[in-house]
Image (tube, rainbow, N blue to C red):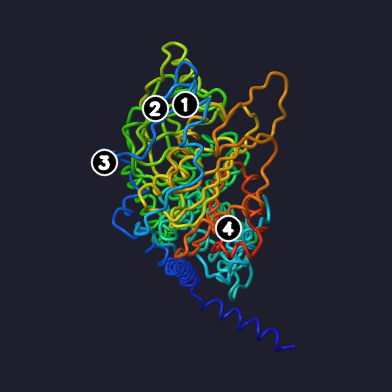
Amino acid sequence: MPFFPRTEALQARAASTLDVQALVYHTVIFLLALVALAFLLRIPRVLARFWRLSEWTKGHLLGYTHNTGPSHTTAISFDAATGYLKEAGSSQESHSSYDDPKFTAMTRPQRDPNRLLPPHMSPNPSFLRPVVSLLRCRVAPGLSYAQAFTCLGYLGVLLYPGIYRSRGPFIDINRYGYLAVSQIPFIFALGTKNSVIGMFLGYGYEKLNFLHRFVARIAIAAAHLHAFGYFYKWCLNSNFQEEIQEPKIYFGLVMLLCFDGLLLTSLSFVRKNAYNVFFYSHIIFLSGVLVGGFYHYPQLLPYLYATVAIYALDKLLRLIKTRISTATIRPIPELGLTRVEIPNINNGWRAGQHVRVRILSSAMGITGWAEVHPFTIASEPGNPEGLVLMCKKAGTWTQKLFAAAATSQTERGIGREVKVVVEGPYGGPGFAMFNSYSAAVFVAGGSGITFALSAAQELIGSDLRSESRVSVIELVWVIQDASSLFPLIPQFTAMIQRCRYTRLSISVHYTKALVGNSKVPGVLPPGLTLSPGRPRLISLLESTVSLAVNTMGRDESASGMIVGVCGPVGLGDDVTKSVGLVDPEKRDLIGGIEMHEETFGW
């Protein structure tokens, strides 16, 4: 019998000598070491990404460059009479017949064997491809096994300081407070637009958002364990009222209430239906957490100073990335979106990146100027129209933007000029280079076509400059109504015309049955097809692999296939599933299949 009391006494003595603050600090260092290790494993891709000096400026700062040499870009202008886009120097009639040899020629000239090819570096060894394919599978809509295991691994690391030599959550109270505050810098680093962690790992902030939310929930849970532990202790000692009146306890309660406010206003329902509430409450409650922390416990200051430094760096970089310019807005009713052209910004982004836009116009309402919305860039760098956005009507702000553009067209027959504040670019493919792959497949749903347009046009331009390995491009667009194709036929046609070495195929699939006098495009150019129903993605992916392998020269080696998807979460899940079902032999034949996802939602 005396053995057990003695053991408990030893445990109590050991726990009392444990430096909990040092334990949490070492856990933070371990997490930073894991980030550093992940960066070291990515160094080969980093070197390949920045293979020449001109690559260092791409995807970081928006700007304007004068095109002094011959342009490979076909200008697309707006026809006010029809409301459609058209190729510059052409008429609407020029798109009804396609007897031009540029369309009908099936043979393509040989590429320059001495062209400057970008280096390709696979993110993982070939023997890990089956494992990577499994990790892409979905646990839940929009959540992969890789993301789930990342969250579980992070939780496992934080459980160590939470339970190591602990006598219980209501006895070792302070360790949970240390743990909660130690995660605040990580929450900011994962959630800011210029994520420090994302910079090192090659991920945009939107790719790290799942981990940002997960870490925040862990911190909130730890904060509540810390607070309720003290509440329980004070109630047992019958001194709750005396303790709660202490100034440092008051500021601790401010932190706790702000944590609760962050949790409630970050729920999916709030983010989707009241984004401005979510956005501004984040600013208020996070400020409350920082202020409360400064006065609650002096030992917390190093973590709070680090948080302020991360936030200040983000604000500085956002200021550097901000441009004020004049844009022309025009409605495209068939697509239910507004086309925004900013000619004074024509360079500095990569395919798949997005910008955050603020419209400075009375047409947006009294508070419209205060709202900032993200949109994927729909044009390639160097485009004569500059930076082009296609803003879908998906809320009050975008509906006002469409109405402003439609009013200007009715009154003047031309677009409306408005002042815009553009911040970015953000996101994108990170360390991956689309032009380093042997083949590319882009699947878009609805307004996700903006990503596919930008990516395909950038690849075509790279190929014309002899800077691309891509031999086959497949663009798949899934829409509800077949008539949505009309406004983009000229642009699709221009893209097909530009392809000299690369094979471009554009397939449009509509899911809504034709009724009554539904408009359906008649004659389409070779390379552009319109079909009912959803695309058969597995067969399309496998046929693209075969075509790319057959197209490559004798001296060329396969460098993989990139599959990009932009659209609803369900579409991203379907494409991911299809990629996983591709024949392993074909997958290895092309050199592996990588994915890049841009999905709607928060």
Q: Residue furthest right?
A: 1
Mark 3–mark 4 Cα distance, whole angstroms, equals 55 Å
Instruction: Estimate how packed mark 1 is, as few (under 14), some (14 to 19) or many (20 or more) residues with alpha carbons within 10 Å.
Output: some
The residue at which mark 4 appears reads as 218
Q: Earlier in the sequence, mark 4 or mark 1?
A: 1
Q: Secondary structure at mark 4?
A: helix
Using the rendered image of the protein, determine whether residue 374 is visible from the camera's viewpoint: no
Which amino acid, by three-letter code, is at mark 2?
A: Ala
Say which quarter of the image contains residue 234.
bottom right
| Image point (65%, 81%), residue name | 8
Residue that appears at 34% across and 60% down: 51
Question: How many angstroms separate mark 2 from mark 3 (CA)?
Answer: 19 Å
Which tag, 3 or 1, sits closer to the chain's start? 3
- Give the image location of residue 208, x and y in percent: 51, 54
Residue placed under numbered mark 3 in the picture = 69
Crowding at mark 3 (Cα within 10 Å: few <14, some 14-19, many 20+)? few
Q: Nearer the viewer, residue 433 or 474?
A: 474
| Amino acid of disc 3 | Gly
Residue receiving disc 1: 85
Q: CA distance from mark 3 to mark 1?
A: 25 Å
